[in-house]
Image (spheres, rainbow, N blue to C red):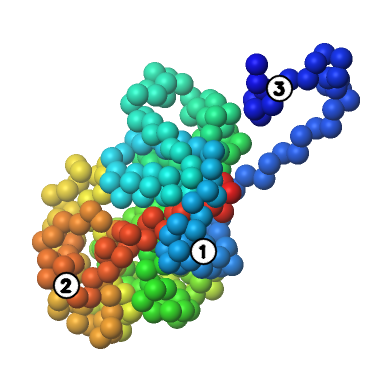
């Protein structure tokens, strides 16, 4: 019978006594939970690698051969699931997709026990769920890297793809101005944390009461780049390189939909609002989009839109992330 490492067990006569064996070195585990785990050098490294992996798409085909990524979904997904599954396959690895309803989690097994068990089977765990505290609890119990595929509080994989898209369009990210208009949500939080490490400047326009988490704003400002909060969409967009928005009602907030539609109406991205940005400005959206709500069809389907580049870049940015965490 083979051992856990694929080798045949030694005979009793040749076995080393447990008390004489050298302790195995504890692996250094790196997670991506919010985006704050990465400094500017790490972000630049991931973006540089992403570009190379996009240009030479098949060059890393065996980099994660024999490794498996467990993917836990408590929220529905299109881009995230497909990009991670395709990314692992293109790197030579495998995925195991787990629906939270079908796991023992649904019968009362603790998150910590789930993290400990999965660590014995796979090279990494990726989670898409609601409460960010659940992700943190799983990561604390895991001995393999854990990746946030989205929580109610953060979406770092989307932010990496967004920065790759901006770098492709404008070259250096230093001094690029992004106007974020709408809800101060999970996408914005990770975009602030990661973007400010590489010199992106932000002007955020939200309705009163829908600002981003003050602790996240403070952490982003400590990276040395500008983060301005306003309640005026026009003020935020003036002279910006990019205008970014997201749905007004994220998953889990559906009971507030009717109220949000009224409150956010002045923050709709229209051709008139885009005209206040730079002539070469781009429109960004993480998708899915609701045309006629947070953005008009003329904008998202128009020549300034880079939303499909953002969606494609999820694949390339995540392949770079997987290679750095699991490789």
Image coords of residue 96 (percent x, y)? 42, 33
User: Which residue bears the numbered disc 2?
Assistant: 302
User: Which residue bears the numbered disc 3?
Assistant: 8
User: Which residue bears the numbered disc 1?
Assistant: 49
Residue most extreme to the top: 12
Between discs 3 and 2, the one toward the N terminus:
3
Distance (Cα) linking label 3 and label 2 = 62 Å
Q: SS of the residue at dot 1?
A: helix
Q: Count residues near mark 2 (Cα–Cα under 10 Å), then give few for <14, some for 14-19, many for 20+.
A: few
Q: SS of the residue at dot 2?
A: loop
Q: Give the residue at x 42% y 21%.
A: 104
Q: Is residue 163 above or below residue 100?
A: below
User: Which is more toward the observer, 42 or 95?
Assistant: 95
User: Which is more toward the observer, 49 or 189?
Assistant: 49
Image coords of residue 13 (percent x, y)? 87, 15
Q: Give the residue at x 20% y 57%.
A: 289
The answer to whether residue 297 is visible is yes
Q: SS of the residue at dot 3?
A: loop
Q: Give the residue at x 37% y 57%.
A: 314
Q: Nearer the viewer, mark 1 or mark 3?
A: 3
Image coords of residue 88 (percent x, y)? 45, 46
Q: Nearer the viewer, mark 2 or mark 1?
A: 1
Q: Give the residue at x 72% y 39%.
A: 26
Location of residue 17 (image quadrant): top right
**CB under 8 Å between discs 1 and 3:** no
The answer to whether residue 158 is visible is no
Q: Count residues near mark 1 (Cα–Cα under 10 Å), then give few for <14, some for 14-19, many for 20+.
A: some
Q: Count residues near mark 3 (Cα–Cα under 10 Å), then give few for <14, some for 14-19, many for 20+.
A: few
Q: Is residue 38 above or below residue 125?
A: below
Between discs 2 and 1, the one toward the N terminus:
1
């Amino acid at each position: 019978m083979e051992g856990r490492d694929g080798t045949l067990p030694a005979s009793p006569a040749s076995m080393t006594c447990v008390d004489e064996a050298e302790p195995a070195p504890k692996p250094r585990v790196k997670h991506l939970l919010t985006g704050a785990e990465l400094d500017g050098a790490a972000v630049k490294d991931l973006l540089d690698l992403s570009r190379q992996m996009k240009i030479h798409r098949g060059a890393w085909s065996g980099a994660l051969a024999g490794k498996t990524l467990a993917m836990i979904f408590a929220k529905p997904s299109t881009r995230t699931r497909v990009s991670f599954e395709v990314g692992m396959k293109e790197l030579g690895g495998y995925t195991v997709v787990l629906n939270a309803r079908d796991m023992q989690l649904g019968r009362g097994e603790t998150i910590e026990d789930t993290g400990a068990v999965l660590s014995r089977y796979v090279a990494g765990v990726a989670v898409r769920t609601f409460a960010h505290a659940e992700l943190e609890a799983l990561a604390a119990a895991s001995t393999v890297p854990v990746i946030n595929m989205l929580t109610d509080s953060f979406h770092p994989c989307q932010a990496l793809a967004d920065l790759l898209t901006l770098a492709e369009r404008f070259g250096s990210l230093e001094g690029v101005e992004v106007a974020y208009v709408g809800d101060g949500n999970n996408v914005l939080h990770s975009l602030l944390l990661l973007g400010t490490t590489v010199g992106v400047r932000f002007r955020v326009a939200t309705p009163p009461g829908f600002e981003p988490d003050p602790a996240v704003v403070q952490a982003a400002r400590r990276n040395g780049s500008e983060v301005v909060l306003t309640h005026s969409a026009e003020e935020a967009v003036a002279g910006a390189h990019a205008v970014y928005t997201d749905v007004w009602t994220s998953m889990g907030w559906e009971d507030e939909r009717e109220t949000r539609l009224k409150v956010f109406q002045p923050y709709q991205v229209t051709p008139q609002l885009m005209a206040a940005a730079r002539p070469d400005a781009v429109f960004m959206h993480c998708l899915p989009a609701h045309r006629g709500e947070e953005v008009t069809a003329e904008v998202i389907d128009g020549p300034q839109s880079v939303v499909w580049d953002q969606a494609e870049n999820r694949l390339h940015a995540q392949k770079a992330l997987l290679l750095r965490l699991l490789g």
